[in-house]
């Protein structure tokens, strides 16, 4: 079954606790937290305090932390102990293999993300160190952008390669493009505006969980 990771970037931030609760009650599988440094992406968002407090308030909740940082290695210790999964980008300035190993050593699952311009082939040698690959379906940095359909091919390719980890996509995901993502082999859908701004998140999530792959892979 497709897993759903609502991205709190699109939440009503003045009501963050009840917004997260709303998504948990609606049946989300995890919560996606975007961390930005203003260098790796041209925007700023959340820091470790949010992740730590969410973990404290909802200890059972899986936190899927997406680090859009030029130097994530410096910050692993303040995120990983509170996270279910920590994802770093393949395009960072730090040695990616060391970073993935350190995330595991700190007790979290390790994800590796690809910007739209990065190919699946470019990370093949690192796949053995990952539990999840995050395919960006928009240029990272902002919510509410249109979905890039060309990215479906990357998901298909990775799914067909027999990659044993989870395949996640992030950016512009809506009910209208989810079936194609599922058919391509997607396991985890990150949704910001598509869920937080929807009139009935519970109905939306029920419909998403009911989607099934129509293709054999
Ligand atoms: C963008 C972030 C996404 C963002 C997705 O850089 O990584 O997680 O919140 O938002 P939507 O679903 O609105 O595109
Ligand atoms: Zn994200």
Image: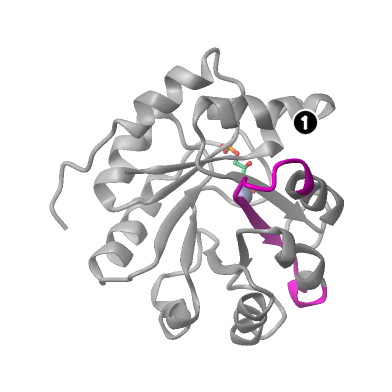
Q: Residue at x 58, y 73 (%)?
A: 90
Q: Is residue 72 magenta?
A: yes
Dividing the picture into quadrants, the one containing residue 86 is bottom right
Dividing the picture into quadrants, the one containing residue 81 is bottom right
Q: Which residue is mark 1?
A: 16
Left or right placement of residue 172 versus residue 185 in this view = right
Left or right placement of residue 109 versus residue 58 in this view = left
Measured as percent of width and height from the top left, residue 59 is found at 69, 48
Q: Residue at x 65, y 57 (%)?
A: 66
Could you tell me which quadrant the N terminus lies in?
top left
Q: Is residue 156 magenta?
A: no
Q: Residue at x 81, y 59 (%)?
A: 37
Left or right placement of residue 168 versus residue 71 in this view = left
Report the residue that reaches farthest toward the top.
199
- In the image, residue 11 sits, relative to residue 109, either above or below, namely above
Left or right placement of residue 212 versus residue 10 in this view = left
Name the element at disc 1: helix
Report the residue that reaches farthest toward the front.
60
Assess mark 1: CB under 8 A from ligand 1?
no
Residue range corresponding to the magenta coloring:
56-74
Measured as percent of width and height from the top left, residue 16 is found at 77, 31
Front residue (pair 58, 180): 58
């Amino acid at each position: 079954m497709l897993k759903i990771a609502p991205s709190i970037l699109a939440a009503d931030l003045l009501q963050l606790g009840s917004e997260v609760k709303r998504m948990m009650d609606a049946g989300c599988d995890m919560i996606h937290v975007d961390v930005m440094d203003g260098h790796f992406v041209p925007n700023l968002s959340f820091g470790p305090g949010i992740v730590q407090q969410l973990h404290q308030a909802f200890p059972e909740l899986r936190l899927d932390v997406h680090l859009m940082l030029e130097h994530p290695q410096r910050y692993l210790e303040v995120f990983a102990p509170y996270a279910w999964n920590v994802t770093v980008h393949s395009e960072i300035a730090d040695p990616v293999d060391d970073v993935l190993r350190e995330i595991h050593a700190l007790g979290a699952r390790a994800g590796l993300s690809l910007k739209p311009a990065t190919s699946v082939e470019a990370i093949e040698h690192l796949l053995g160190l990952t539990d999840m690959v995050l395919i960006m379906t928009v240029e990272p940095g902002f919510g509410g952008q249109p979905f890039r359909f060309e990215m479906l091919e990357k998901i298909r390719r990775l799914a067909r390669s027999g990659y044993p980890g989870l395949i996640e996509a992030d950016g512009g995901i809506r009910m209208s493009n989810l079936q194609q993502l599922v058919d391509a082999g997607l396991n985890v859908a990150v949704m910001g505006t598509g869920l937080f701004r929807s009139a009935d998140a519970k109905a939306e999530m029920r419909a998403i969980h009911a989607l099934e792959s129509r293709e054999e892979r």
